[in-house]
Every structure is written in structure tokens, then in C-alpha cells.
Image (cartoon, rainbow, N blue to C red):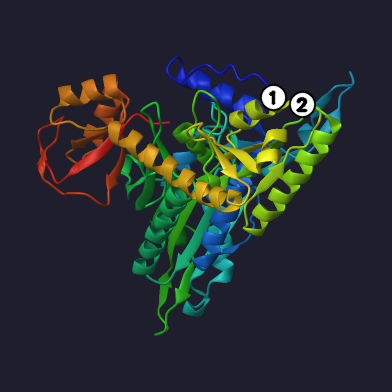
Amino acid sequence: MGKNLTSRAEDYSKWYNELVIKADLAENSGVRGCMVIKPYGFSIWEMMQKELDRMFKETGHRNAYFPLFIPKSYFSKEASHVDGFAKECAVVTHYRLKTSEDGSIVVDDKAKLEEELIVRPTSETIIWDTYRKWIQSYRDLPILINQWANVVRWEMRTRLFLRTAEFLWQEGHTAHATKQEAIAEAEQMMHVYADFAENFMAVPVIKGTKSANERFAGALETYCIEAMMQDGKALQAGTSHFLGQNFAKAFDVKFSDKDGSLNHVWATSWGVSTRLMGALIMTHSDDNGLVLPPNLAPDQVVIVPIYRTEEQYEQTVAKGKELVEALRLKGIRVTLDSRDTHKPGWKFNEYELKGVPVRVALGPKDLENKTFEVARRDNLSKELVSEAEAVSYIEQLLIDIQDNLFQKALTMRHSLTHEAETYDEFKTLIEEKGGFVWAHWDGSSETEERIKNETKATIRCIPLEGPEQPGQCIFTGRESARKVLFAKAY
């Protein structure tokens, strides 16, 4: 399996597209803007799902499922929400096809829907219409629900995983008796996402809130985690929204309090999507292919027997099976590639391309010397390890690789983080160096919009941590309470 990837330095965008295809993660489908996630890509997504699902349940959430179709009238109930999604909605107008006189298949004009249905771009409206039936009293609260689903946002310029017309995600939707509870929930989920990104994806993130211009449509506050990719562009890796009472008022969702008074409930929603696959690829991978953090790798270890004769094949495979059993007892995900249809060199190439964290080679000499050759994908180094120490060595190696990938990404982000004191300095940094740029901003949407139009940089977040030092806005010179984080973004 030849890699022949375009290098990142030569053309980062082309490198990314080639890697997604060649590593067998996904491909474009016959439907414009939609992708086929291939088994290997989907197995990584399943690892993400599994860990996130566990984290959601540990914080008291349960899974449910809501309809794919949303009546158009639901969208008109929350004005800012419909404004935010109107241009991306796919609309179902008919419910039947028929065969025309010339034998072609056409839409049956007589089968027009009384009310058009929107293919969900997000589910707040259908869920809040449902919650109205579920909530009467404070005893019914809080409602803490998540759904794993697909959504459709009609994107015209698409890229595998990063931006597709249909994508997979989870969306949490919660209802609370008080404003404080809802804000605490929205903040909690931002921290859950950050924990997942850093400890499983090995992607360092900055936590913060979005500016009014960048907020989710219908939210009073959007909390986010922002990651930095190797090419100096930011990627929003997860968002959590405090929705206030906007949706409760739009759908008339009230509850009677302990004292009998009627109040509108308070809401949140939060989600991450298959964009995380893009973040994973672009943070760690190199010119040889995918690099996966062990915590999310479907196979953490692959064992490749090396042999010339039938007897050697049987001996190395038997020894490989012993190592498989010993590693599995330690909870390590391991596979033995005993296929005799491909040469070991081809396999080494394939597993390097697919980013398997640890590769073990085992040949006749290793059998004699009671050793294994252990290669790590993150830095491509190899060690000869004794049979007696192999399991404990590999156990520790997986921990080291996970940590090394995080530290490497942190160092990369640090090298791509700058500060600007003047607008000229800001424009130069954004254009020539990219990355995150800390700069003072006067807090107005107009200033933000003008900076975006002139430089293509947006405010990625108003950070929750870090110094709050007042200064002057780089664009207008007006007072600014603290620096915010700008970047060009995916």
C-alpha cells in the first residue's frame, strides 16, 4: 500500500483530503456534499461515541430519540433560531413519486404535504414541543436528555468530516427549574467536552464564551472549546448553549413551582459532531499518514509476523497469539495480522498510514532471542523488547504515546499563539503567521464584523481563564476589559 501523500508543507488542504481517503476513513458519496464513513473511520467515531456516552451518563443524562422531520411552523416560533438556520434547511414538500407516461419517475403533484417538513438541522424546536407535554410541575425537572443522530445543513462548500451537508452528532437538550441550574449545566457540558478533547483526543483546547455575533441562533450564551490545527487555523471542537427561557416561551413550556406559581422553564442544548474526526486528523497526523492517540485507536497494538517458510509462519503466529491474549488481559485493544495475502512491508506501511499507535514485529530471530520489535507511530522509533517485559513495556508505551501527543499538540499551539497591540500588527500576524492572536476588542458587533470582513479572522472565544487586563481596542481605540482570541477558522 503506497502512501504517496502530498506533504503538509506543500499543500495542507490536499494532504488532509488525501489522508482521509487513503487511510480508509471516508469518501464522497453519490449525493453531493454527503459522505460515506468507511468502517475504519466509523470505528474511530464509535470509540468517540462510547467515551462521550459514558461521560454523559456519568453526569446524569439519558439517551432518547426524536423525529428527523420538523414541521415548518415550529421554526417560526423562535425568531432568531429560524434566522440562524433558514438558509441551510432542506425542505420536504411531497410524500410520493409516480411513473410518468414516458416511464420516468417524477414527483406526484397530488401528493403535496399540507405543511412542509424540515429535515432537522438541529432539534430544539421538535424537542421543546415534546417537552411541553412532559413538564407540568417542578417534580418533572430537570430533564437531562441526549440524542445521537444525524442532521442536515445544506452546505455548498463541503469537506469530508469538517463540513458536510449531512453529519453525525449528539445533541443534548435539558430543561431546568432555575436560571442558575441551566447555566451550571451549560458550563458543566463545556468542561465535559474539554475533558474528552484533552484526555481522549489528546487535543488541548481553550474554554470560553462566544461573542454575540458567533453565538448559536436562539442562545443567550454559547460556551465553547477551541482547538488549533497544524496549519494555523482554529477549529471549534464543541459548544454548549444557555438558551434562557427563549424556547420555553416560544413553545409555552411552564411548570408549577413549589409555591404553586407558574414559571417558564430554563433550557440548554449542547453538541459535538463528526467534525471531531477532522480535529483528530489535523492535530496529530503527519506526512506518513494518520496518527491516533491510543485512547481512541480502534486497534492500539497490531502484531505482524515475519516469516519465509510455512513452519516459520506457524511459529510466529503462535507466539503472536500468546502476546494477543496477554495484552487483552490488560484491556489493550490488539489485533494479530496473520494474513498471508500481503507481505510484512506492505502491512507496516498500511498500519503507519492508518495511525495504529504500536506495531509489534515478530520474526524467526525474535523467536530465537525471545524478543519483540516494538515500533511507536507517534515518533516512528523502534525498540527490541524482551518477551518477559513486553506486556508491561507496551502498557506503559501506550500511556507515554497518549501523553506525548498531547504535549506535542500543546507545543504546536504555543508556537502558533501571538499577541497584537495594534491593528497593523494584528493584520500582519493573521496573514503571515496564522494561529491564535490575542487582541483587545471593544465588545461591539460592528467592530467584530469589520475585522472579520477585512482579515477573515473571527473571535474564537472570550476566554474563561487568563488575565483580565484592560486596554484599548486594536481597531477603534475604545476601552476594552480584556484581550480575546482571534483566528481564521474551519
Q: Is residue 295 at all visible to an observer of this figure?
A: no
The answer to which image quadrant residue 408 occupies is top left
- 376 and 37: which is toward the camera: 376
The amino acid beneath tag 1 is: Trp
Residue that sits furthest to the bottom in the current view: 259
The amino acid beneath tag 2 is: His
Q: Position of residue 3 (x, y in %)?
A: 61, 20
- 430 and 348: which is toward the camera: 348
Local SS, label 1: helix
Q: Which residue is mark 2?
A: 342
Q: Which residue is mark 1?
A: 346
Q: CA distance from mark 1 to mark 2?
A: 6 Å
* In the displayed structure image, the side of residue 275 where residue 22 appears, left or right: right
Residue under the point 45% across and 35% down: 283
Residue under the point 58% across and 40% down: 358
Q: Position of residue 335 (x, y in %)?
A: 70, 44
Residue that sits furthest to the front in the current view: 368
The answer to which image quadrant residue 230 occupies is top left
Q: Position of residue 252 (x, y in %)?
A: 48, 64
- 440 and 258: which is toward the camera: 440
Asked if disc 1 and disc 2 are in contact, CB closer than 8 Å, the reply is: yes
Q: Is residue 212 above or below residue 342?
A: below
Residue under the point 55% across and 42% down: 121
Q: Is residue 399 above or below residue 486?
A: below
Q: Quadrant of the C terminus?
A: top left
Q: Position of residue 266 (x, y in %)?
A: 41, 65
Residue under the point 86% across and 24% down: 100
* In the displayed structure image, the side of residue 189 where residue 363 appears, left or right: right
